[in-house]
Image (spheres, rainbow, N blue to C red):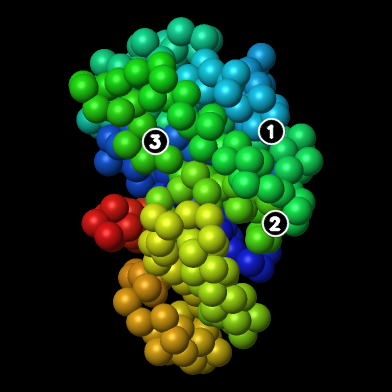
């Protein structure tokens, strides 16, 4: 599933991290692919520098990329609260090239295909069909290597954090995806951008990806006391119908602190974080059920 927005600054990466946190809490083996050259998702997931290839270099030689050996585990796994089911399932060691074997015995899997500025070489509007299939070829390596957990595919969920544009990297992500989740804030320009993105998905599906569909729209950074936000939410409900997912995600004062500490929202103390975590739990269940 690609996480996309046409407009920057709407919290697309924050939603990606919130859904990754919900997947970790639910024990869903998950891979996050940080396709944004800014690599903010990589930072927020607490990935430590290692010798693995970043996603941009994997895209350069996709058929030679061994994704299972290049991903890195999220640093969030080190902060799973003691006494929880996820903590009991946490593997003792998942560092290095052989960490996939350790992961097979546990459902606590949150891996990251690391982002970097290098991927920006593919963020061009003139990519051909062969270039659009680069991420698909990288992901095909998972099947070739037959990595499994309990007889199921290693990752049950793959989240791709896209740049805030419709250039090459986003289209590479869409080609490899089953669904696109759109992120918008309840403002005029963001709502208009979401409508344009839905049209772009339809056009892209007709030409390049016949199985692609919209997973829904997440309204993010909602201020409950704002009359403008209330008006725009009503407008979005009218425009997008059932594609507008509930609950909406409220603007959170400590979100920067949580991300700066590279922690999952489900592991952060306080009522605001608990409310946000419950919201992402509900959103993830809706998305997976579509």
In three-dimensional space, the C-alpha distance between marks 2 and 3, rounded to whole angstroms, equals 25 Å
Splitting the image into 4 quarters, where does residue 203 fall?
bottom right
Which mark identifies residue 56?
1
Residue 183 showing in the rendered view: no
Q: Is residue 202 above or below residue 263?
A: below
Which mark identifies residue 167?
2
Neighbor class of circle 3 (other Cα within 10 Å; few <14, some 14-19, many 20+) is: many
Q: Is residue 8 above or below residue 194?
A: above
User: Residue drawn at (40%, 61%), measured in percent from left and top?
Assistant: 213
**Tag nearer the camera, 3 or 1:** 1
Label whose residue precedes the other's in the sequence (2 or 3): 3
Camera-nearest residue between 195 and 247: 195
Q: Is residue 113 above or below residue 265?
A: above
Task: Name the image quarter holding the C terminus.
Answer: bottom left
Q: Is residue 145 above or below residue 260?
A: above
**Tag nearer the camera, 2 or 3:** 2
User: Residue drawn at (61%, 27%), measured in percent from left and top?
Assistant: 62
Neighbor class of circle 1 (other Cα within 10 Å; few <14, some 14-19, many 20+) is: many
Residue 40 location, x and y as percent?
65, 44
In three-dimensional space, the C-alpha distance between marks 3 and 1, rounded to whole angstroms, equals 20 Å
Residue 105 location, x and y as percent?
26, 16
In the displayed structure image, the side of residue 38 where residue 271 appears, left or right: left
Residue 278 location, x and y as percent?
32, 57
In the displayed structure image, the side of residue 120 where residue 41 appears, left or right: left
Residue 135 showing in the rendered view: yes
In the displayed structure image, the side of residue 18 where residue 274 appears, left or right: left
Residue labelled with disc 3: 30
């Amino acid at each position: 599933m690609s996480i996309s927005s046409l407009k920057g600054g709407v919290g697309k990466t924050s939603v990606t991290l919130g859904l990754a946190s919900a997947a970790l809490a639910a024990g869903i083996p998950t891979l996050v692919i940080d396709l944004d050259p800014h690599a903010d998702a990589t930072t927020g997931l607490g990935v430590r520098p290692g010798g693995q290839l970043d996603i941009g270099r994997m895209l350069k030689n996709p058929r030679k990329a061994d994704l299972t050996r290049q991903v890195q585990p999220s640093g969030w796994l080190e902060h799973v609260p003691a006494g929880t089911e996820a903590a009991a399932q946490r593997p003792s060691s998942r560092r290095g090239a052989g960490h996939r074997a350790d992961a097979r015995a546990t459902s606590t899997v949150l891996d990251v295909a690391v982002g970097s500025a290098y991927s920006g070489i593919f963020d061009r509007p003139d990519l051909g069909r062969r270039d659009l299939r680069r991420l698909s070829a990288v992901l095909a390596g998972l099947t070739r290597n037959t990595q499994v957990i309990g007889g199921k595919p290693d990752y049950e969920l793959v989240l791709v954090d896209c740049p805030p544009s419709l250039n090459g990297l986003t289209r590479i992500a869409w080609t490899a995806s089953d669904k696109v989740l759109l992120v918008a804030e309840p403002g005029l320009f963001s709502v208009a951008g979401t409508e344009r993105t839905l049209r772009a998905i339809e056009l892209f599906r007709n030409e390049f990806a016949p199985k692609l569909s919209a997973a829904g729209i997440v309204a993010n950074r909602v201020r409950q006391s704002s009359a403008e936000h209330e008006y725009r939410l009503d407008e979005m409900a009218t425009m997008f119908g059932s594609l507008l997912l509930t609950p909406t995600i409220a603007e959170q004062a400590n979100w920067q602190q949580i991300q700066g500490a590279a922690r999952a929202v489900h592991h952060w103390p306080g009522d605001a974080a608990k409310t946000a975590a419950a919201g992402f739990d509900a959103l993830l269940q809706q998305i997976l059920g579509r």
